[in-house]
Image (cartoon, helix red, strand yellow):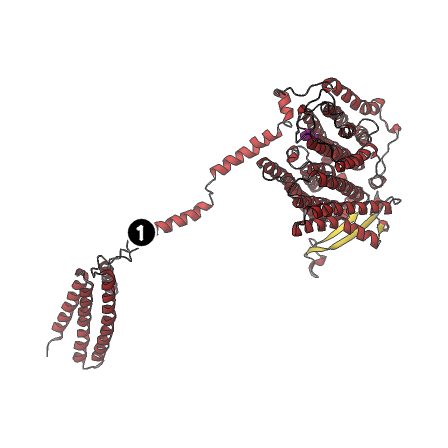
Amino acid sequence: MNSLFMNDLLMNDLLMNNLLMAIPLLPLCSAAILILFQPNERWTRILGVSSVSLAALLALLLNVQVWDEELFIIQASLGEWLSIGTSELASQHAGSLKLSFGLYLDPLSLVMITIICCIGALIHVYSASYMIQDADQCRFFAYLNLFVSSMLILVLADNLVLLYLGWEGVGLCSYLLIGFWYQKTDNNRAANKAFIITRIGDTAMLIGIILLFYQFDTVNIQQIQQQSQVFLQANTAGENQLIALSCLLLFAGAAGKSAQMPLHSWLPDAMAGPTPVSALIHAATMVTAGIYLIARNDALYQLAPQVLMFIAIIGVLTLLLGATSALFQTDLKRILAYSTISQLGYMFLALGVGAASTAIFHLMTHAFFKALLFLSAGALIYCMNHEQDIMKMGGLRKKLPLLALSFAIGCAALASLPMTSGFFSKELILQQVAMAEQPLLWWGALLGALFTALYSGKLFFIIFMGKPGHAPSHKTPAVMGAVLIVLMILALFGGIQPQGILHQFGELTLDSSSGLTLLEHGLPILVPLIGVILAWFLFGQTRGDKPVNRVGLGRFIHSGWGFDTLFSSVFITPFKKLTYLNRHDIIDASFRALETVSYRLHLMFNRLQTGQLRRYSASLILFSILAIAWGVIR
Amino acid sequence: MIEITWILVLSGVLFAIGLFGLLSRRNLLFMLISLEIMLNGVALIFVAASSLHGNVDGQLMYLFILTLAACEVAVGLALVIHIYRQQQDLDVDKLTKLKG
C-alpha cells in the first residue's frame, strides 16, 4: 500500500492531463451556456445531453488508457486558486496555505468518475425524454449538468478545500433540483429540508477540514494520507484525540450527504424532485459523496479505529432503519428512497470494518441497480399517469412487460439474489464483516438483507403480480426503454469488482480458509431467497386497494423511526417558541428606544413653536434680560 | 444742560413704551412702530453719551442706527404690505401658519 505514494506512478502524459481536465469542465461549460444563453428546447436537450455523454466517453477512454496499469496517478491543474501567507517572508512558517484547482486521478477516483459520468449520461438521455413536456427544460438541464460537474470536481479534487467546493456545489444543485417544481410549497419545503440537514453535516465537515489543516499543515489529501501512514507506522497516533475528532467531524459531513442516521431524514422527502433527479441523487451523485470521502481518507481513518467502529455501528443502525421503513411504505419512490438509505448503511458498514474497496464496489453496483430502479419507477409513474401509490397498481406484468423485466432485475439486484450485481458486492460486505469478527454487526446486516429481500419482493409482487389495479395510460417511450435496457445489462452483469481499487486499498484475503464457518458462508446466500419467498406468500396475491391502517409499531416504522417527529419536537418547536418570544428582536430594542426618545422630545419642543409672533418676541426679550442679568451677577 | 440721569430715564421710558407696545399690540404695523420707538430710545443714549463725553463717536453711531432703522422699516413695511395683500389681515395672533 505504501507504494501508492511513490512518485514513479505519476503519469505525465499531456493527452491524459487534458482528458482529465476536460471531464469536469465539459458539463460545467454546458451548464454555463445553458444558464447564460438559454437556447431553445431542442438545443437545450442536445447540449445538456451531449456534454455529459462526451464526458462519459472521455472517462471510458481514460479507463482504456490505464487498463493494464495496476496503480497510477494522473494529475492536472486548472490553475491557482488562492494563497494565504505564502509571501517570501512567511513561506517558511507554518500556517501558510496554497490552494490550486488541482485534479488528482487514481483508481478510486477513476471508478467514481466512470460511475458518475456513465450513469449521469444515461440519466441525461432519459431526462431528455422524461422532461419533454416540461416548459423549463433549460433550467433543468443547466442544474443537472452543474450537478454532475460539481460531483466530478468533488471526486477529482486533490485538496480538501476544492473537494469542499464540489461538496457544496452538489448540495446547492440538489436543493435547486429537489425544488425544481417550485410552484408547489411542499417541494420547496423538501428542498429546504435537504439543504438545511446536509448543511449541518457540512458545517461539521468544514470544522474537520480546518482541524486537519491545523494538525497536518496542509489540506492536500495525498499529503495527509502519507503523513497518516507515517503516524500509523510510528504508532504514535494512539494518544492523538484531535485526529479522531477531525475524523468524526468529516464523518458527520459524510453522514449528512449520504443520509446516515440521524441526518437521513431529508432523503425520503427529496423525492419531491423530478424522478431522473432522484435517480441522479441516489445513484450517481450526492449520496455517494460521503462514501467517497471516507474511502479517500482511508489512511487517516486507520488512525482512529474507534471512529471506524462508530461508523460501522451507525451503518448497521441505518441499514436496519432504512430496510424496515421501506417495508412499510406504500409510495413507490419513498420505498426506493429508504432502500437507498439502507444500502448506504451497508457501504458505511463496509467502511467501518476497514473494507473501503468493498464499499466502493457496492457503491458501483448500487449505482447500477438503483439507477435502473429509479428510472423504471419514473417510467412506471409516467405510464400510470403520475400515480405513485403501489397499492393502486397490480398485475401490470402483461401490460408493461419491459418495465416488469427491468423491475424484476432491479429488485433482484437490490435483494442481492445470486448472480446479480448486487449479490457479489453485498456478499463481499457480509464476508468482510464476518472476518472483522463483529457478530452483532454481522447479524444486523443479515437481518437487513432479509428485510431488503422482503421489501424488494413486495415491491415487485404488488405492482406486477396479483390482481390488476389501475390500467396504464401510456406506453413506455422508446428512449426510456433503451436506457433501461442498458442499465438492466449493467445491473445484471456489473458485479465485477474494479481491480484498481483492490490494489489501491491492498489485497483482501478472500480464500475460504480465512476462518469463515459454513453458516457465515451459506446464510448470506440463503437469506435473500428466504426473504423473496416470504414476500411471495405475504404479498404475492394481494389485491392492493384495501386501505392501510397503521397503528403503533407500524406507524412508528412507517415514519422512518419517528425521526421527523423527534427533530420537530427537539429542535423546531423550541426554536419556533424562542423566535416567537423574541419576535420584536431584543437587539433592536435599543434602536427603537432612541427613536422613541427623539420622538417624545420632538413633541415637547414642537409645542414651543406656536407661530405666535408676540410669544416669540416675549421669550426673546425674557431670555435677553436673563442673559444680561446673569452677566451682571457673575 | 440737562442732567444725564433724566435723559437715561427718558430713553428707558421710551424703550419700555416700545416694549410694551411690541408685546401688547396685535397689529403688525403697530408692532413695527413700537420697534422704532425702542430703537430711538437706545439711539438717544448714544447721543446723550456723546455730548457728555465730548466725543463724536456716539453721534456717528446714531447716524448708523438711523440708516439701519430706515432700511429695516423699508423692508418691514414691504413685508407688512405683502402680508396684508396675501392674508387680508395684520393680526399677528391669526398669522400663525408657521407653527410646528
Residue furthest to the left in view is B1
Q: Which residue is mark 1?
A: A604
Can you say whether A29 is above or below B61 in the image? above
The question of residue A487 being in magenta is answered with no
Provide the chain ID for the residue under circle 1: A
Residue A538 image position (x, y, % from top left): 72, 18
Instruction: Provide residue B16's location: percent of width, then percent of height.
Output: 16, 65
Q: In the image, A175: left or right of A149? A: left
Spot occupied by residue A374 in the image (x, y as percentages of width and height): 72, 33
Q: Secondary structure at mark 1?
A: helix
The stretch of residues the image draws in magenta is: A330-338
Check disc 1 and give the amino acid type: Met
Q: For residue A358, say whether it is visible.
A: no
Closest to the observer: A74 or A511?
A74
Which corner quadrant of the image does residue A174 belong to?
top right
Q: Position of residue B37 (x, y in %)?
A: 17, 69
Quick check: A510 left or right of A322? right
Res. A270 image quadrant: top right
Task: Find out whether residue A336 is within the magenta segment.
Answer: yes
| Residue under the image location 80 percent in, 22 percent down | A529
Q: Is residue A516 left or right of residue A159?
A: right
From this view, report whether residue A610 is shown above or below residue A236.
below
Label 1 neighbour load within 10 Å: few <14, some 14-19, many 20+:
few
Q: Nearer the viewer, residue A193 or A290?
A: A193
Residue in the picture at 21% in, 57% down: B93
Whether residue A103 appears in this view of the structure is yes
